[in-house]
Amino acid sequence: MSSNNILETPIEFLKGVGPQRAQLLKTELNISNFEELLQHFPFRYVDRSKFYNIAEVIDAVAFIQIKGLIIKTETIGEKRAKRFVATLKDHTGTIELVWFQGLKWVSEFVKAGQQYVAFGKPTDFKGKFSFSHPEIELYEHYIQLGTDGLHGIYSSTERLKNYGLDSKGILKIMRLLLNQLEGQLTEFLPLSLVQENNFVARELAWKNIHIPANANDLKEAEFRLKFEELFIIQMRLLKIKTKRNLSYKGMVFEKVGAHFNKFYNEYLPYQLTGAQKRVIKEIRGDMGSGKQMNRLLQGDVGSGKTVVAMICMLIALDNDYQSCLMAPTEILANQHYTTINELLKDMPVKVGLLTGSTGKKQRAVLFEALLNGDLHLLIGTHALIEEKVQFKNLGFVVIDEQHRFGVEQRSKLWSKSQQYVPHVLVMTATPIPRTLAMTVYGDLDISIIDELPPGRKPILTVHRFDDKRLDVYEFIRGQIALGRQAYIVYPLIEESEKLDYKNLEEGYDMVLYQFPIPQYQISIVHGKMKAKTKDWEMQRFVNGTTQIMVATTVIEVGVNVPNASIMLIESVERFGLSQLHQLRGRVGRGAEQSYCILMSSHKLSKEARLRIDTMVRTNDGFEIAEVDLKLRGPGNIEGTQQSGLVDLKLTNIAQDQEIIELARNAAYYFIEKDPDLQLPEHAQLLQHLRQNSKSKSNWSRIS
Ligand code: ADP
Ligand code: MG
């Protein structure tokens, strides 16, 4: 491609578009240049070679095309019921085509006595089929485009249609664009890659994705263009990674010294699982390597990530570096603080806590101790990234529950130590399918704890309809009699917050009624409470004063009360899968059998049904994440929104896993072989990446 990139040409300069339609394309479809038009892919293809007989038309078929003679047209009805009806006839029967809008245009265009092709979805009205708002074309025009081949259908809008840019109109300008780009969409993938994978030529791929002659051409075009899309992302991510490795020297933690050994041999209250040991080894490897660590630690709820983080902090301390641990909520920060102090007992390690509620005086003391190095570990919330927080020598940063933090917040912590960038460990309990992780966290190394501490009984999960509520309460009373505690969780989503709070209050009243004082004590926690009250209520549950905790999803993340063995989730149909999995992870932390009860009404959508069935079937977070990805698509998986990297136009992360791996491996190969793409055979690739990154990322800046 030439260096003044033709793809960036404003769309109004395309023949047949002009300023007015250009403006519309911009506002309606966000298409402002050649490239964006090119990337407006058909959302469906019709087989132009196949016509249905009118007699064959049934409701079940989706979009079909028929052809025939218009034998009659009429405009009938008044006002909003006013419509244009044309009767189309072939050798098997007749069918009505109906329009409620654009009557002027359609009544001029559709004339009795002429042959047409109509395309659309038949609808059944009182046993009689008709097409409402079909796409329609004169048969003689239709065959001029050829009847063999697939016909791309593009999304459009009412306004665009009024300006002739319905699907057909878009196809028309697409053809003009493809003509104009002839000879310009040159190859940039290295030849070896093209040959190895049998990729079709780039220009042909772009043509065939819009105007495929047959299904095979389309398949090949898709394969190549998806690869292209993913390969560029992977190159970008790996470039960021290698760049980081080159420009930031990692502090070398070579000693595994007194603190680590003492803790490991004398204080650790249990045996680490094999997975925990493996992960600690991986982290140690990074820390000692001279590279700056950027590692994502994935581990299901309850897999024991906290102790892993803490042990690694001790390694930092053995090398005279400070560490910090950042949690997404105050409750969690407090809990980590408590847990870590309990684990360390009387070891000579100074741990501090910094949250939004840390008072001024305390802060001053903390800040001083941080600066002079008296404080070894700092645990806290977002408060940690404030400018005022300065360390003497921060060497290791742990971020818990990654999905609450964006990449930017991560890097804010880096700038805290002047000379070096500390090692960073990001922990998440929301497992992410491998291919998604490759795409979203492709710049991080990944460790996985795929084993739960021994002795855990799998949580039993059941689904109950609302009318079994009294039985469920009876069951809970039985468990409480055995000394257990229970969570009862209500949904709370912003859009219907008012109603949700009402439900919570009513639910709370119901629980109070079913579990009367003084035999039972109940805590309630929700987002509208003051932090102090919340903590107090929480504390009462943690220390066993209360047996039941009524809450909204604020308890979703991280809270650890091993004696709680029941998780009752109300209106389960309103929760997402990953949220349900997180909630369930609040129980099953002690030695007792735990239960998760999913309550719903009888009215369940197909998806809600699938979510519930998945929860009942498996406790495996990775399996659940896969289902979640398929159900909701990558954009909705927590942690991906802020990354901005999953802006994929063609690839479906859930379905195209093989291509993702292919692209990842290819990118690895080239970055390793030729990190700066200086070899002559990579010149085009380098140029393409630079060009491609101008708007979207910072390849040009980092290379
Ligand atoms: P998460 O990975 O969800 O953050 P935690 O770190 O909170 O999990 O650990 C969950 C529970 O498991 C804690 O009570 C912790 O003490 C316990 N635990 C962690 N590792 C082990 C182990 N190897 N053996 C037994 N219990 C463990
Ligand atoms: Mg945790």
Image (tube, rainbow, N blue to C red):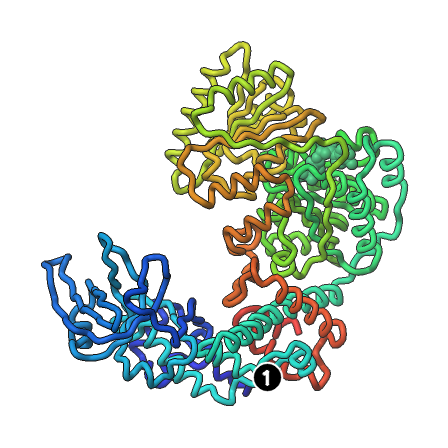
Mark 1, Cα crowd under 10 Å, few <14 / some 14-19 / many 20+, is some
When the figure is inspected, residue 274 is found, relative to residue 193, above or below; the finding is above
Locate residue 694 relative to residue 171 in the image: left or right.
Answer: right
Locate residue 257 relative to residue 517 in the image: left or right.
Answer: right
Picture quadrant of ligand 2: top right
Residue 293, percent across and down? 75, 56
Residue in view at x 72 percent, y 32 percent: 456
Residue 188, percent across and down? 61, 82
> In which quarter of the view is residue 199 placed?
bottom right
Locate residue 53 relative to residue 235 in the image: left or right.
Answer: left
When the figure is inspected, residue 336 is found, relative to residue 179, above or below; the finding is above
Residue 652, percent across and down? 54, 62
Q: Tell me, yes or no, if residue 189 can be seen here.
A: yes
Quarter that holds the N terminus = bottom right
- Determine which residue is flagged by label 1: 187
Residue 306, percent across and down? 72, 39
Q: Tell me, yes or no, if residue 339 can be seen here.
A: no
Residue in view at x 51 percent, y 89 percent: 183
> As rendered, which of 41 and 32 lies closer to the eye?
41
When the figure is inspected, residue 262 is found, relative to residue 51, above or below; the finding is above
> As rendered, which of 13 and 615 lies closer to the eye?
615
Locate residue 175 relative to residue 389 in the image: left or right.
Answer: left
Tell me the amino acid under the disc marked 1: Glu
Count all numbered tags in the image, as a single digit: 1
Residue in view at x 69 percent, y 43 percent: 325
